[in-house]
């Protein structure tokens, strides 16, 4: 029997966040995936370095890969240091991979990384979203909603 997944993930230390993703995409479903990293990549992430601003994920040969994410070289690394922008394998269950593959191929959706973080057990994880791109009108609507919420809170503070 499958273990029920928690509603929110156990984020202890967020390393990198893709803040633009929630503005550019309609987030449909969120997955938690492990990352296959080398030793110097883990050390670099623990120091809080890393960026996923322009990265994406793709399904290739039945595996999910994080492409174009930047984990800079470890400052105290030696000749065995890692390559900063190499594709990194994401660790997901087969059922999740097949679900993602179907959604990307049939529905035209995109796999967008939302954040990289360390969980309570000290493992590096990626919050991966199955998303559909927004058009310009949707983005304008998002801006209107955000401004209205800000205005609402300001009015409540002043008169509440």
Image: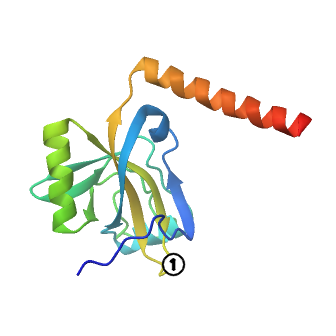
Residue 136 at what x, y percent from top left? Answer: 43, 18
Residue occupying the far left of the picture: 61
Residue occupying the far right of the picture: 159
Residue occupying the far front of the picture: 160
Q: Quadrant of residue 116?
A: bottom left
Q: Quadrant of the N terminus?
A: bottom left
Residue 124 at what x, y percent from top left? Answer: 42, 70
- The residue depicted at 32 percent of the width and 36 percent of the height is 132
Residue 8 at what x, y percent from top left? Answer: 48, 64
Element at badge 1? loop
Q: Quadrant of the C terminus?
A: top right
Residue nearest the observer in this picture, 70 or 92: 92
Vertical placement of 68 versus 25: above or below? Answer: below
- The residue depicted at 38 percent of the width and 22 percent of the height is 135
- The residue depicted at 53 percent of the width and 68 percent of the height is 11
Vertical placement of 134 versus 41: above or below? Answer: above
Vertical placement of 105 versus 31: above or below? Answer: above
Residue occupying the far top of the picture: 137
Q: Which residue is mark 1?
A: 120
Residue nearest the observer in this picture, 159 or 146: 159
């Amino acid at each position: 029997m499958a273990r029920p997944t928690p509603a929110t993930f156990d984020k202890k230390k967020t390393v990198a966040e893709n803040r633009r993703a929630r503005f550019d995409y309609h987030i449909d479903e969120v997955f938690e995936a492990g990352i296959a990293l080398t030793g110097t990549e883990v050390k670099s992430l623990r120091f809080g370095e890393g960026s996923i601003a322009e990265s994406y994920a793709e399904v290739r040969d039945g595996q999910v890969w994080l492409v174009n994410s930047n984990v800079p070289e470890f400052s105290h690394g030696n000749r065995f240091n890692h390559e900063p922008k190499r594709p990194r394998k994401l660790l997901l269950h087969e059922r999740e991979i097949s679900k993602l593959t179907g959604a990307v191929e049939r529905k035209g959706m995109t796999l967008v990384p939302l954040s990289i973080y360390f969980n309570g057990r000290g493992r590096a994880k990626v919050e991966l979203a199955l998303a559909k791109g927004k058009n310009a009108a949707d983005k304008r609507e998002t801006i209107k909603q955000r401004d209205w919420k800000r205005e609402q809170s300001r009015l409540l503070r002043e008169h509440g």
